[in-house]
Image (cartoon, helix red, strand yellow):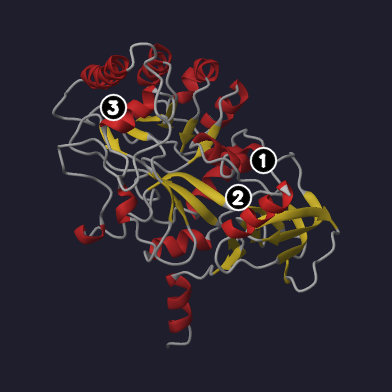
Amino acid sequence: MTRTIAWLLTLAAAPAGAQTLAVTHAEAWTMEASEPVKDATIVIENGRIASVAPGGAVPQGATVIDARGKPVTPGLMNGATQVGLIETASADTRDQGSADDRNPGFDPARALNGNSTLVDLIRADGITRALVYPALSRIPVFAGEPVIARFREGVDILGEREVAVYAVIGGGAWDKLGSRAQQWTVLRKVLSDAKDAMAARDPGDAKKRDRRGPPPGRARRAGEELIRGVIAGETPLAIHTNRESDIREAIKLAGDFGIRVIIVEGAQAWRAADALAAAKIPVVLDPSTNLPGSFDELGARQDNAAILTRAGVKVAFGLAGGRIHSNYNAGMALREGAGIAVANGLPYADALRAVTVNPLSIWGKGGGTLVPGSEADLVVWDGDPLEPSTNATAVIVEGRRVSNRSRQDLLAERYRDVR
C-alpha cells in the first residue's frame, strides 16, 4: 500500500508532458564514480532517471536518443550568473538590482525572463540550471536573495527562491560606508540584531523557529525574516568577496554566529584553503580568473580550484564578477573555465562535479547525478563537454527533451545563403 501511494505521488509530481525516453550507447557520467559507465542505456520515466545500465534494454514505446558512444552528463549548473535578469546594456532589459532603500530582501524571481535570448543560448550550451544572483542594492551590505533558475522551455524558468541571503564585501563595493572594516561591522550588527530579536521572542533558544511557514495566503516576509533564517541555520549567507583578509573574516563570522557561509568569487581563496576546509565553507569561483580586475583580486591564479579541492573545500564553478561572461556566453564560458581548471591540476571528475553536483549541493538543492530516482536533467554531447568547441546534441530538462537551438542558430540559417 505504501509503495502504491508513493508511486501515485511520483506520477502526480511528474512534469507536464513527461514521456519515457531512452538514451542508448552513452558514456554516462553518473557523478557517483570517477569514471563513466560505458555503453549505457539511460531510461527516463515520469521526469526521473529510472535506470542506468550497460547495454540495458529499451522500454517498449520509449523515444530513443542514440548517444553514439559520446559523453552524457547531468545537466550542468552555472553556480553564479545573472542570466534571466540582463539582456543587453539597455536599461529596460536590466533587472538585476534594487534602488529601494527600505528592505534588504530584493527578490529577483519576479523579473526572471524565460524569453531572453541569453536563456536559449545558455540552454543550448548544456546548462539546465543556474544560481541567479542580484547586483548591489541601496542597503549595504546586502544585495538581496539569489534564486535558482531552471532552464525549461517557456517563460517560467523559476526553480527555487529564498536560496540564500546575498552580501557583498570589498573595496569600493559600498561607497557610503567607506572602509571594508565598516562593511563587516554593518554585517555583524545586522546578524547580532536578528539573533537578539529571536532570543527575545524565545529566551530559551534563539535558534528555535516555527517551521510551519507563514499563514495561508501570506507570503514569507523578505529582508529581516530571511536574515533570521540565516541565524536559525535555515538559509546560508553568501558573501561575494575576493581578498584573503575578507575571506578569513568570513570564516570567523561563520564561527562566531554558527551560521552557514558560502564564498562567491573568492579570487584569493586558495590562500585560505585549509581554514575554509576546516570551517566547511564552500567556494563558488570562476576557474578562468587569471589577471586581476581590481586590487582585491591580486593573487588570482588559475589553479585556485585545484588547491581548494586538494585541501578538502567543496568547489563549484560560476561566473560571478566576470566582466562579460557572467551573462553572455555563460554556458560556453563555464565549460571552458572547467577545462582550464583541469589544465591547471584539477582532476577531470572533480571539474565535472564542480558544474553538476557541487553547485546544487552548495546552494541547498541537491541532485545533479544520473542515478535511479534523480531528476532527469541531462545532456548528450558530441565530444568532451569541457571543450568549448563541443556541442550539446540533446538537452533534457525535467524528463523532456527541449530545444537546443539559439537565436544565433536561427540567424545563421536565415542568412547562410545570402550573397
Question: Number of marks in the image?
Answer: 3
Q: Is residue 317 visible?
A: yes
Of callouts 1 and 2, which one flags the residue occurring earlier in the amino acid sequence?
1
Q: Amino acid at mark 3?
A: Gly
Q: How far is the residue under mark 1 from the one under mark 2?
A: 9 Å
Residue 24 image offset from top left, x and y in percent: 77, 64
> Which is more N-terminal, label 3 or label 1?
3
Question: In the picture shown, does residue 251 fall above or below 137?
Answer: above
Q: Which residue is mark 3?
A: 170
Q: Is residue 371 above or below residue 55?
A: above
Disc number placed over residue 348 in the picture, else none: 1
Identify the disc placed on residue 386. 2
> Is 84 or 302 nearer to us in this picture?
84
- Is residue 119 or residue 194 the one in the foreground? 194
On screen, residue 412 versus residue 31, left or right, reads left
Q: Do labels 1 and 2 touch, CB within 8 Å?
A: yes
State which quarter of the image contains the C terminus: bottom left
Element under disc 1: helix
Q: Secondary structure at mark 2?
A: loop
Q: Which secondary structure lies at badge 3? A: loop
Between marks 2 and 3, how big is the CA–CA gap? 31 Å
Local packing at callout 3 (Cα closer than 10 Å; few below 14, some 14-19, many 20+) is many
Q: Three-letter amino acid code at disc 1?
A: Tyr
